[in-house]
Image: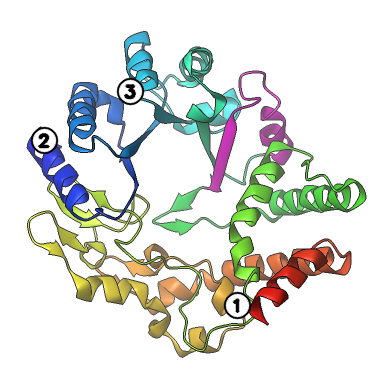
Amino acid sequence: MSYETAKKAIDFYMNHSVDCEEKVIGFYGGEPLLQFDLIKRIIDYCNITFRGHRILYTITTNGTLLTDEIIDFLVKNRVSITVSLDGPKEIHDKNRKYINNEGSYDTVMKNLKKLKTKCDNEKQCSVNMVIDTDNEYKKISDFFNEPIIKNIRVRWNIVEEDNNVKAVNEQFISNFEYQTFLGYVRYLRENNFVAPDGLVQGEFENRAIVDSHFNSYFLPNITAPGGPCIPGKLRLMVDCDGKIFPCVRISETSICTNIGSLDDGFDNEKINSLLNIAQLTEECKNCWAFSLCSVCAKQAVNKDKLCVESKRKQCTVSRRSAWNQLMDRILLYENRIHEKKMNTIKEGVF
């Protein structure tokens, strides 16, 4: 991306977020630190443009280029740094290699240790783990006990192929669900949500986020499925040519996900089609998991159009997730964990 395009994106953001007290700028790649000089110029420009506002910066990096100079600059400007790390050495080095075919694990761990030492607080540094369920569950879960990883927030997700979740290994999922069950048993016994391992701890945090689905005592007459966000409302991704997309997770090669440009603004027709992916099929409108749906618009994209079949492929996974959420909730309700919370909600309604 050129500096001129970056400036234009920042100005666009400023003009479209006047009511937002907190501004967030994120740097993604490829590997964003290959353009560290550009990042420095962008942050300097943001610090001037957003003076008087609270501004947060984030960056996701593979961790191989974290020199002392780069770390010091990022820490000084309070940049939240996420390092991509896929597990222990033999797993990480399968896919994250240098051009000479050597794995990057040793370099990443050395730099992560240095980063952890220099960060002002533990929240400034985190790890993102992409999990291939063909690997052994215990090898990945044990990795969370590594001294360098302890006390660092770890986010994880399942590896994807062509924007869709790869077929998962049932044994891996079975092990994960059993450990999740043990976590709930401990919660019911001790009223303390301490997970058996790091993978489950991350899942507990994710499920806390979706708690809002259960806080409504009544369902509205008109609503949208739970999966899609409102494109352009909370976040944007701008590519090197100034094209606008809903977020960094969605395909930037598809015409149907391009919701505007820095020059022309938002394309409301594209936004509406992404938001209303439930209209692709009648099954969506009658699905019992409608409000708990986790199917994002990106999973309905097939080349340059939204595709019914691509969306349907994700329905089984989404309904399984919704079913598990309901079972967890019922378990907690039956043990009176949320009785006080529900009484508070009822009092507010009536």
Where does the magenta region start and end?
136-158
Name the quadrant containing residue 209: bottom right
Which numbered circle lies on residue 2? 2
Kindly identify which residue carries mark 3.
99
User: Residue 194's spot in the image, x, y percent?
Assistant: 78, 41
User: Residue 102's spot in the image, x, y percent?
Assistant: 43, 19
Name which residue lies at 85% across and 48% down. Answer: 191
Going by the numbered disc 3, the residue's amino acid type is Ile
Q: Are marks 3 and 1 in contact (CB under 8 Å)?
A: no
Query: Which comes sooner in the sequence, label 3 or label 1?
Result: 3
- Compared to residue 278, the image places residue 184 above or below, namely above
Residue 273 lies in the magenta-colored region: no
Going by the numbered disc 2, the residue's amino acid type is Ser
- Compared to residue 287, the image places residue 185 above or below, namely above
Kindly identify which residue carries mark 1.
289
Q: Residues within 10 Å of mark 1 (few under 14, many from 20)?
A: many
